[in-house]
Image: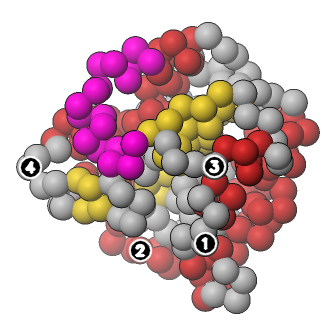
Amino acid sequence: MKQQFKEDFEEILRRIAESDSLALSRAADGEASVLKNVTVGNKDGWLYKKDRNLVFRADLRKSLLCTDENYLYGLSCTCCDRENHEFLLRTVRTSLQNLTFSNIWVNANFAAFNERFLPALRVSGKPVVLCTNEKARLGDLGRRIPINDFLPIPGNCVKYWEKKREEILAWLDLKASMVQGTIFLFAAGPLSEILIYEMWKVNPMNIYLDIGSTLDPILFRRDSRGYHKPGHAFADRVCVW
């Protein structure tokens, strides 16, 4: 990665097409707040409580320490959140070449994402597995790309992880170890980072991508973020490292 907004987007799309081993984990203000042990949640239904969900915090922190060559981290940028950019840079352990933007799919890159991401998955010929909220409308996405498997997550991913951690780990082991060259798409809030890391440890010969809220207009039929709307200030923002 070169920490250039457009160039990094193109490089990740290229790797999705040409590689069978890739991870993209993204950390921004929500993940940073969890790491700082600050109560935080969002409109998607997850909630982290200070001093109450420390198991989740510990696992999230560990998920940001991978140094493998094909394991990428997207972090907050200075133009959107300088404080957390610097905080997250101090948290990760990987080299600069494995770092890019947490906003890599969105803001001024979203138009290209919207036009090219799903076709790129389809053309790759690789099986696709989706991990997101249990209320997602799979049929709408399935008309655009074939979905080979679905891993549903309840709305409060923090509570879900802490309540069923060992069961989920066994489930992840099964799903990751039984396939190779498969693309896993994650849209499960900060739990995505933990899931990606745990599955990577089981089998790095898959592609694990945190896609965040990018597919909300398809999966939930709502524009949940400003960048989804053409003309919004975020829709034109070219992020700066």
Residue 220 falls left or right of residue 160: right
Magenta extent: 154-171
Of labels 2 and 3, the one closer to you:
3
Q: Where residue 215 sits in the image (x, y, percent)?
A: 65, 57
Residue most extreme to the left: 51
| Residue 223, disc | 1
- Secondary structure under tag 1 reads loop
**Are there few (<14), some (14-19), or many (20+) residues within 10 Å of tag 2?**
few
Q: CA distance from mark 4 to mark 3?
A: 35 Å
Q: What residue is rendered at 11% in x and 46% in y?
A: 52
Q: Mark 2 or mark 4, which has the lower sequence index?
A: 4
Circle 3 crowding by C-alpha within 10 Å: few under 14, some 14–19, many from 20:
some
- Per the image, the residue denoted by label 3 is 137
Crowdedness near tag 1: few (<14), some (14–19) or many (≥20) residues, C-alpha within 10 Å:
some
Element type at marker 4?
loop
The kind of residue on which mark 4 rests is Asp
Considering only vertical position in the picture, is 223 above or below 72?
below
Q: CA distance from mark 2 to mark 4?
A: 25 Å
Counting residues from the start of the chain, the first of labels 2 and 1 encountered is 2
Residue that extends furthest to the right in the rendered view of this protein: 123
Residue 68 x %, y %: 53, 29
Task: State which mark lies toward you, 2 or 1.
Answer: 1
Specify which label sits upstream in the sequence, 2 or 3.
2
